[in-house]
Image: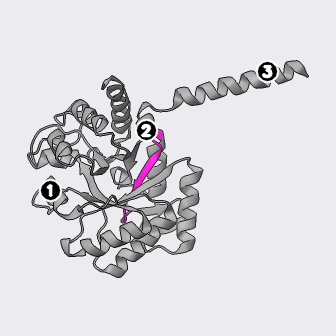
Amino acid sequence: MKNVMILAALAFCLGSTGIFAQKNPEAKAGWQLGAQAYSFRLYSFADALRKIDSCGLKYVEAFPGQNIGGGIAGKMDFKMDAATRSAVKKMIKDKGLTLVAYGVVNTKTEEEWKTLFEFAKDMGIKNINSEPAVAQIPYIRRMAEDYKIIVAMHNHPKPSHYWHPDSVLAVIGNSKYLGACADIGHWVRSGLDPVECLKKLEGRVLGMHFKDLEQKAPKTHDVVWGTGVCNIPGVLAELKRQNFKGPISAEYEYKWENNGPEIAESARNFRAMYSKVQ
């Protein structure tokens, strides 16, 4: 009996050691490295979950227009009914993943924003990524503070309203629930330096859409992180300096039919670069 207890204790210790060894390095900083399901927009959300998991990622950002799949009818729309929400939550949990963000999503009315916040609350979503009309900001701010859910302004390339950090800073005020969803690739497409943009938004970057691009040009495409022009080591160093915490979604908009291998390689590169950043 004593020997059995010793073996059990040893197995527990080895298992615990394995758990800690497998913990990804960025997690220690509070970074939730995952993927935007839009990277797999040609597939269902159910398929996207499988692909995200296969890339070595555990966090998910959903987007509204994707078919749910996996035997569940409908799309990942924030107006889905309670039964569908429950089925989707189970599907995510069964895969061992965590839904942390939703977007990029916009609504037309205050009532629709309320529905969106209720959806996010029920689904456990912490970040809503959006490009709302400036006129909507007062009631979005009020709801974000009431629900304690972040609304992060996403920057599509110019002429999108939020393409430049200044336009984000102009609307977010001092609320801790309003900030930026920093898409570093789109900044580069707009002719901006992603590190300088992060500095301008210091303390207000609440989420990320992560990319690396082949060229500094409006019309270019994603490449494996660390092989392009987005200065990924510099971006990681600046995020570390700012003590950033939050979701970082891989959004790989290239080789749509089979971009999983390059997303997986990007995640490996990200972790290797992260470990070298002081």
Q: Tell me the CA gap for discs 3 and 2.
A: 34 Å
Q: Is residue 83 magenta?
A: no
Q: Is residue 130 visible?
A: yes
Image position of 176 with respect to 270: above or below: below
- Circle 1 is placed at which residue position? 163
Q: Quadrant of the C terminus?
A: top left
Single out the residue that lies furthest toward the right. 1
Badge 1 local density, few (<14 within 10 Å), some, or many (20+)?
many
Image position of 84 with respect to 163: above or below: below
Image position of 2 with respect to 263: above or below: above
Numbered disc in front, either 3 or 2: 3
Residue at 64% in and 28% down: 16
Query: Residue 189: x and y, percent?
Result: 13, 47
Residue at 39% in and 76% down: 114
Q: Secondary structure at mark 3?
A: helix
**Disc nearer the start of the sequence (2/1):** 2
Q: Nearer the viewer, residue 258 or 233?
A: 233
- Toward which corner of the image does residue 64 lie, by quadrant? bottom left
Do the residues bearing badges 1 and 3 touch, measured as CB atoms within 8 Å? no
Horizontally, residue 267 falls left or right of residue 235, namely right
- What's under tag 1, amino acid-wise? Trp
- Toward which corner of the image does residue 225 lie, by quadrant? top left
- Circle 2 is placed at which residue position? 55
- Circle 3 is placed at which residue position? 7
- What's under tag 3, amino acid-wise? Leu
Badge 2 local density, few (<14 within 10 Å), some, or many (20+)?
many
Which colouring convention does the figure follow?
Answer: one colour
Query: Residue 161: x and y, percent?
Result: 14, 63
- Magenta range is 54-66
